Image (spheres, coloured by chain):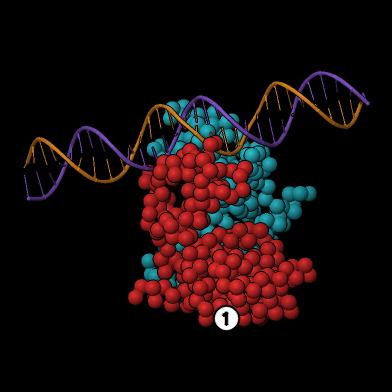
Chain colours: A red, B cyan, C orange, D purple
Amino acid sequence: MMMEEFEVNASEFLPLREVVYMTLRKAILTEKLRPGERLMENTIAQKLGVSRTPVREAIRMLGDEGLVDLIPRRGAQVAQISLQELKDVLEIRKSLEVLATERACEIMDEEEMYALRRAEERFDTAVRGGDPTELAEADVAFHDVIYTAAGNRRLLSILSNLREQMYRFRLEYLKQPDTLANLVEEHRAIVGAVEKRDAEAAKALIIAHIDNQKTGISRMLAGKEA
Amino acid sequence: MMMEEFEVNASEFLPLREVVYMTLRKAILTEKLRPGERLMENTIAQKLGVSRTPVREAIRMLGDEGLVDLIPRRGAQVAQISLQELKDVLEIRKSLEVLATERACEIMDEEEMYALRRAEERFDTAVRGGDPTELAEADVAFHDVIYTAAGNRRLLSILSNLREQMYRFRLEYLKQPDTLANLVEEHRAIVGAVEKRDAEAAKALIIAHIDNQKTGISRMLAGKEA
DNA sequence: ATACAAAATACTGTATACAATCCGGGCGCC
DNA sequence: GGCGCCCGGATTGTATACAGTATTTTGTAT
């Protein structure tokens, strides 16, 4: 496969399509590839030193996640995410996070409870630390504990996918210092409710959590326009 | 591409991967390819008279839909759908159908209302007609009107995907004559609630609709085991 | 006979070559 | 001068060839 040592350092002997996928994904999320930009198989393949085949497959994966738009016979381009689409995604997430949280309240075991508390602490630490990447990962990890505890694999996969849609915004969002304090508080409250297995309370908290995100991101975008 | 006239009659000059995808999908849904059966790229490619490339892509599409399990370096096999997975899917659908119905109640316009009534009539007719394929399609069309009216494209796509998961069961399920009468009645009630824009009532009806499906299919599967 | 090892085989992963289609530019015609 | 057609280049779609790995088979030794 050659692959002149180059960009892609990550753990070798992974399928190439995964490597290409992760590389492109990162480039999109960090805005190195801007929305609307075309992804040409040949160009990318040459740039990464691989053949078109894994590039093709990687691009299709990104298409499934919604990070790129696939246009037949025209190729792919980095997806524009409109405010409308963002709202759509958040609306779906609200329904499904509620579901996940309710189920988690019902069937979560002690081990998972412990993991949840640990995840909350990690997020707490990350907020104080200030590294945005770690912060985002800690947030992901926190919610993942709940998703997983819900015991519905399909739900986990859908929620993970929806999260991807928002990643670009989240990175910005998580930089706003005033939101961070809120987030810590919200997470703490959610953990409390789940620990008591109080599904009603947890549901309300999750709804508020998502609604806050929606207003926060909307405000952020509105500010950016100006 | 040659493609010796063969099986795949459907509208030519569609990308081959689509043709292969539809062919395989149909084969799985009609149980010509049984759960657990391996899908080997070479074999399928030869059988359909195409190369491995479009077959590969088609198989990956089926993987996304959950109709086949993709195992790295081992290929794909037709997914076993356990009762648990079925319940998982129905649980998610319940949340999202509720969401779709509520939104539809809010923002559906007159044209879509009309389409909904037409779809209900079509289903009604199909029940009397007795052709199971038409029946399934009419049911899909009915729910699609609501999904679409909800005005959330991502939601539409997720719900469509989840429906695929259940297709195999639905075909069997829709053959049971006693359920059919119920279904017609449930659809009629849903249309009534949506027409009045009574989101609460519609929500309750949709929940009942899905719960009925769940018990119906569970009973059917239990019967089959014995 | 069984267990282990080694080789053959069969399959996926990757690369490359070829075909078909779409887009833009230039030229001619109206 | 504008509209349309044709041609060439660019890019995706498809086919095939090659490489690497996992699985199965077969042989041998205990």
Type of amino acid at the residue the image marks with label 1? Asn
Q: Secondary structure under badge 1?
A: helix
In the picture, measured across the screen, residue A69 lies left or right of residue A145, that is left
Instruction: Give the residue drawn at x 78%, y 70%.
Output: A110
The residue pinned by badge 1 equals A182
Q: B121 above or below B18?
A: below
Residue A151: quarter of image: bottom right
Residue B58 can be seen, yes or no: no
Q: Position of residue A21 (x, y in %)?
A: 52, 50
The total of numbered circles placed on residues is 1
Q: A9 above or below A205?
A: above
Neighbourhood count class around disc 1 (C-alpha, 10 Å): few under 14, some 14–19, many 20 upward? few
Q: Position of residue A59 (x, y in %)?
A: 48, 48
Q: Position of residue A22 (x, y in %)?
A: 54, 52
**Which quadrant is home to the N terminus of chain A?**
top right
Instruction: Give the residue drawn at x 50%, y 76%.
Output: A176
Residue A27 can be seen, yes or no: yes
Q: Position of residue B16 (x, y in %)?
A: 45, 37
Residue C25: quarter of image: top left
Q: A72 above or below A141?
A: above
**Which quadrant is home to the C terminus of chain A?**
bottom left
Instruction: Give the residue drawn at x 66%, y 58%.
Output: A153
**Which chain does tag 1 point to?**
A
Which residue occupies the extreme front position in the image?
Answer: A5
Q: Nearest the camera: B69 or B204?
A: B69
Instruction: Give the residue drawn at x 51%, y 68%.
Output: A170
